[in-house]
Structure formats: structure tokens, C-alpha cells
């Protein structure tokens, strides 16, 4: 230990305390690895044993730096890493790109792991200065563009993993800067094993290069899931029907629009090379942009050397726009098309106007809809329950039909959950299976909710309680305690607003059902602690002029 170290060891604690936060921030991992500082909170440093040694302590001059599983947006500055770093693990971060010279200065680095990031851009010269690098893992990123400049500065690289990216092919010369390369894995979900990859098989054979057995073809379908390294050059053909790993037209379904409406289209497809083009047709006639006519056609864009996108917008639709609209992808190998039909309605056509409906199932905005068409709206989502609703799963769709005369019919909202908390819970009670073993427990639970009957705001609250009382009625002979609980629930419902009781009676004869249940259990002996209720009162409600 040097003189400075001895002075620090003997320094008073009061002098060290102010430095403590800085020591923890700059080198939180050095406590277990003296002399291996990394001033980055998510990184750890340790010594690494040279490959081939079976025993003994790690060589302190060789450093292993792990910065995995963090939120690094880019690789750490090389100057922040310890001298002698031979392994750098940067997997499972949020690195989006590699700049020219990203690792310049790490001249001893032998292994670099960048898998499971979101890297989409690798600038030429990104790996310059890594003259000793032997293993490079770029798997499971978003890399689509690869050129010979991508791998400059890697004369000793032996193993390269670029699988799990988004490219579908690799161009000749990509690996020219890698004279020592022995194993490469380039399997992707888009890998297209056609004539564009023939060069790779012959190049690999001449260089004694091994294509990893995990490098599997995704396209064409005839070669799907076959190892590229096991194929013959003659099998890599560009004849036959064109198969694209991506070809989408949005919208894809028949469109019914009104004069004056605006309608955008987007067509995306695989980019197979400089000969890939997207062309638009209307009723099989080639389309050109015409701003005065309301036809806006944007220039095609190429994304990550893998996808090509074209956008078409009809800004002011007229009757002329009716018919078939087509997005055609043309390549040297052939063409592929996606089509969609447009029906343009004149303003004189019968339709239902846009209308907003708010009810106990949600707030729905029904669009202007052609007569004779059924419109659909998504339900609101309530994650509190997974109980399926009658006729569908929670949070599906409501529907409403516009009749032939252009009038809205009542909508079907039964697939949507109730917006009111109490109503939703009471509905779940109705859905629950009931038997002799759980009837009393359910009744006690339901009584708790009816204690808040004065705050009921939906007639369905009364309807669902009445339906549960009817279900409990079938078990009163076996479970005498049910009588008292049922009477309490009926008594609690007397606190409900009379108008809601009237609506519940009209909806489902809820009041009549409760009266009938009370009459059946009226002769049973009630506990002196039970809350008494007048059957006469319920009968008077049922027989009132508003009763049904």
C-alpha cells in the first residue's frame, strides 16, 4: 500500500463521510474487485481467467465488465471502462444504435455481447479499434441494413451472431472485412432463401465458414425451417410465385364512405432490393398523384433496408372513387397485389345520423351509418373481473342497426360491463352458480350490498337482488337461516327510490317477485333479532297504479 493509501486508512471518519455518496455512485461494484472501477451504476467489474486455464485465480490484468439488464441507451464511453477489459456484456439494455468509434480504445476486447437491445442503426466504423475481438453477438435487435462497412476493424473475429434481426437477405461483400470468420448465425423470421443468397453458400464453402445450424430459412414456404447451410445452390431460386414476408394494405376491408369524406391508405411490403416498387391502381388503371382532384400520393419510403411503404390519401372523395383500389408490389421476380373496394354514397342516400348514447353500459358515439348496416362500438374495459357476460366476453362490442328507413334501432349493449360499481357486483352475484353449500354465504354477502340500497341508482340493482331472492327461495326449507337474511334484504330495498322500484317492476316484475317470495316465507318463524317487514306494504306497491 502506498503512502497515500496509508494516509487514507488513518484519516478521521469525519473526512470520509462527505466522500461516501460519491464513492458509492462512482464505483459501487469495486468493493468485491479492488482496482476494477466502473463509474456506471448498472455495471459490474471483475477479473477474468484467461481461456484455457482450468484453475488458479483470475488474472487481475484481464477485466470482465457486465452492464446487462439495465436501461443504457448507448454503450458506455470506452474511457469509463477499466484498462484490460477483455469481455464487455451489454445485453438486455435499451441501446438503439452504434456510432462510428463506439468502442474505440478497447483494444484488448475479445468478447462483445449486444444481444437483446433495440439496435436499428450500426454506423460504418462502429467497431473500429477492436483488433482483438473474437466473438460478437448482435442477436435479437432491429438491424435491417448490413454492408461491408458495418464490420470494419474486426480482423480477428471468429464468431458472429446476427440472428433475430429484421433483415431478409444479405448482400455479397458483407463479410469481406472479416478474414478470420469461422462461424456465423444469421437466422431471422424474415430470412428469404432465394437466388440472392446463392453467393453466401459458395463463399462459405470456399472460406471453410460454418453457417450455424440455427440459421433457418423462413421463406419461401418450400424451404421453410430448413437449415440454410444444408441446402444446395440450385435450391435457391427466384422463379415461381412471388412470396413476400410482409404485404399489408390498410384499410383491408370494404369501405363504405360518403361524398366529401377523407380516406387514407397505407401499403407496406418486403423490400427485396432496388427493383422493388409499389404502384397504385384504381379499377386496374395506374394511378398518379393529382392534388387538385384530391389524390395525394406520397413518395415511397424504405425502412431499415427491409420494408417499403407507400401512402395514398383521398382528401375529398367523390362518386368517381367507387370501385377497386389496388396496391401492387413489383420486383424482378414478379408482382403481388392487395385490393380493397370502396363504395361512395351520395349525400341523398338514406343513413342514420351520428348519435351519442350514454347508458348504464357506457358512453357510445355511433357514427353516421348507411341504412341497412349494423354498426359496432368497443365496450369500455374493466379489469376488476373476468366473469363472462351473457353472449360474449367482457369488453367486447356493442352493436346497433340502422334500419332501411334510416332510423336507429335500439342497440345491443349486453356484451358490455356496467359502468356502475354496485350494478357490476350485483350482476356477478346473478352469474354465480348457487347450491346448498354456498347459498347462505352468498346471501350474507348480498345483504351487505343491499344495506346501501338507498344509494342504488339503476333499476337493474333491484332486478338483480330480486332474482337472487328467487334463487335463495329454493333453499329455505334446507337452510332456515336464509329466511332472516332474505327478509333483511327485502327490507333494505324499501330504501330504494320509488321510481327505480317502478322501473324494476316494469323491466322484470322485480317487486312482484319479492312479494311472492315474502308470501312463501311469511309463515316461517322469524328470529326476534330479524328486521321485520310489512308484506302488506310490498303488496300495496305491487297493486299501485304504476305496478305492472
Image (cartoon, grey):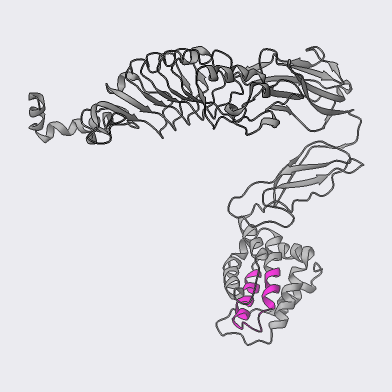
Q: Is residue 547 visible?
A: yes
Q: Determine whether 246 is above or below 373 in the image.
A: above
Q: Quadrant of residue 278?
A: top right
The residue depicted at 63 percent of the width and 72 percent of the height is: 489
Is residue 131 covered in magenta? no
Which secondary structure dominates the residues rendered in magenta?
A: helix
Vertical position of residue 355 compared to residue 432: above or below: above
Name the spot of residue 481 as percent of width and height, x first. 59, 81
Q: Is residue 63 left or right of residue 538?
A: left
Residue 168: horizontal and vertical position, in percent?
Answer: 61, 24
Whether residue 532 is visible to the viewer of this picture, yes or no, is no
**Which residue is at the front of the view, 260 or 119?**
119
Relative side of 23 to 344, left or right:
left
User: Residue placed at 60% from the left, 16% from the top?
Assistant: 199
Q: Is residue 486 magenta?
A: yes
Q: Which residues are magenta?
A: 466-493
Q: Position of residue 54 (x, y in %)?
A: 28, 35
Amino acid at each position: 500500500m502506498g503512502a497515500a493509501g496509508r494516509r487514507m486508512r488513518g484519516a478521521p471518519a469525519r473526512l470520509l463521510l462527505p466522500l461516501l455518496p460519491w464513492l458509492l455512485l462512482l464505483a459501487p461494484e469495486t468493493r468485491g474487485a479492488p482496482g476494477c472501477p466502473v463509474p456506471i451504476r448498472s455495471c459490474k467489474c471483475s477479473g477474468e481467467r484467461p481461456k484455457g486455464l482450468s484453475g488458479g485465480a483470475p488474472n487481475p490484468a484481464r477485466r470482465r465488465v457486465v452492464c446487462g439488464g439495465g436501461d443504457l441507451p448507448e454503450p458506455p464511453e470506452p474511457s469509463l471502462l477499466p484498462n484490460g477489459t477483455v469481455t464487455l456484456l451489454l445485453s438486455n439494455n435499451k441501446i438503439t444504435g452504434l456510432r462510428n468509434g463506439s468502442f474505440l480504445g478497447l483494444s484488448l476486447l475479445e468478447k462483445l455481447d449486444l444481444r437483446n437491445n433495440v439496435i436499428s442503426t450500426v454506423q460504418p466504423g462502429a467497431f473500429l479499434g477492436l483488433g482483438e475481438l473474437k466473438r460478437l453477438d448482435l442477436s435479437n435487435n432491429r438491424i435491417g441494413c448490413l454492408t461491408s462497412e458495418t464490420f470494419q476493424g474486426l480482423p480477428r473475429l471468429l464468431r458472429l451472431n446476427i440472428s433475430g434481426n429484421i433483415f431478409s437477405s444479405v448482400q455479397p461483400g458483407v463479410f469481406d472485412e472479416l478474414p478470420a470468420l469461422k462461424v456465423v448465425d444469421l437466422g431471422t423470421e424474415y430470412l428469404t432463401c432465394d437466388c440472392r443468397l446463392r453467393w453466401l453458400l459458395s463463399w462459405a464453402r470456399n472460406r471453410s465458414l460454418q453457417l450455424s445450424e440455427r440459421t433457418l430459412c423462413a421463406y419461401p414456404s418450400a424451404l421453410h425451417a430448413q437449415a440454410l447451410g444444408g441446402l444446395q445452390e440450385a435450391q435457391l431460386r427466384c422463379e415461381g410465385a412471388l412470396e413476400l414476408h410482409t404485404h399489408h394494405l390498410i384499410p383491408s376491408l370494404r369501405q363504405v364512405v360518403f361524398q366529401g369524406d377523407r380516406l387514407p391508405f397505407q401499403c407496406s411490403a418486403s423490400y427485396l432490393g432496388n427493383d422493388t416498387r409499389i404502384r397504385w391502381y384504381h379499377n386496374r388503371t395506374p394511378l398518379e398523384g393529382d392534388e387538385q382532384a384530391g389524390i395525394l400520393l406520397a413518395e415511397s419510403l424504405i425502412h431499415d433496408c427491409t420494408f417499403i411503404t407507400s401512402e395514398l390519401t383521398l382528401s375529398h372523395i367523390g362518386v368517381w372513387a367507387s370501385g377497386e383500389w389496388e396496391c401492387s408490389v413489383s420486383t424482378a421476380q414478379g408482382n403481388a397485389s392487395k385490393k380493397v373496394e370502396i363504395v361512395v354514397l351520395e349525400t341523398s342516400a338514406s343513413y342514420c345520423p351520428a348519435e351519442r348514447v350514454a347508458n348504464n353500459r357506457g358512453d357510445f358515439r355511433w357514427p353516421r351509418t348507411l341504412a341497412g348496416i349494423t354498426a359496432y362500438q368497443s365496450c369500455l374495459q374493466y379489469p376488476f373481473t373476468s366473469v363472462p357476460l351473457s353472449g360474449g366476453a367482457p369488453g367486447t362490442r356493442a352493436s346497433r342497426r340502422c334500419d332501411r328507413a334510416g332510423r336507429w334501432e335500439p342497440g345491443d349493449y349486453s356484451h358490455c360491463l356496467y359502468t356502475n360499481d354496485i350494478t357490476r357486483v350485483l350482476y356477478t352475484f346473478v352469474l354465480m352458480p348457487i347450491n346448498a353449500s354456498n347459498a347462505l354465504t352468498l346471501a350474507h354477502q348480498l345483504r351487505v350490498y343491499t344495506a346501501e340500497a338507498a344509494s342504488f341508482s339503476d333499476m337493474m340493482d333491484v332486478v338483480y337482488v330480486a332474482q337472487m331472492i328467487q334463487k335463495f327461495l329454493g333453499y329455505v326449507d334446507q337452510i332456515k337461516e336464509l329466511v332472516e337474511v332474505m327478509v333483511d334484504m327485502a327490507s333494505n330495498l324499501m330504501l330504494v327510490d320509488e321510481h327505480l322500484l317502478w322501473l324494476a317492476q316494469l323491466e322484470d316484475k322485480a317487486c312482484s317477485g319479492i312479494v311472492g317470495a315474502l308470501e312463501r316465507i311469511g309463515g316461517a318463524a322469524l328470529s326476534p333479532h330479524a328486521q321485520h317487514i310489512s308484506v302488506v306494504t310490498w303488496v300495496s306497491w305491487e297493486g299501485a297504479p304504476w305496478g305492472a
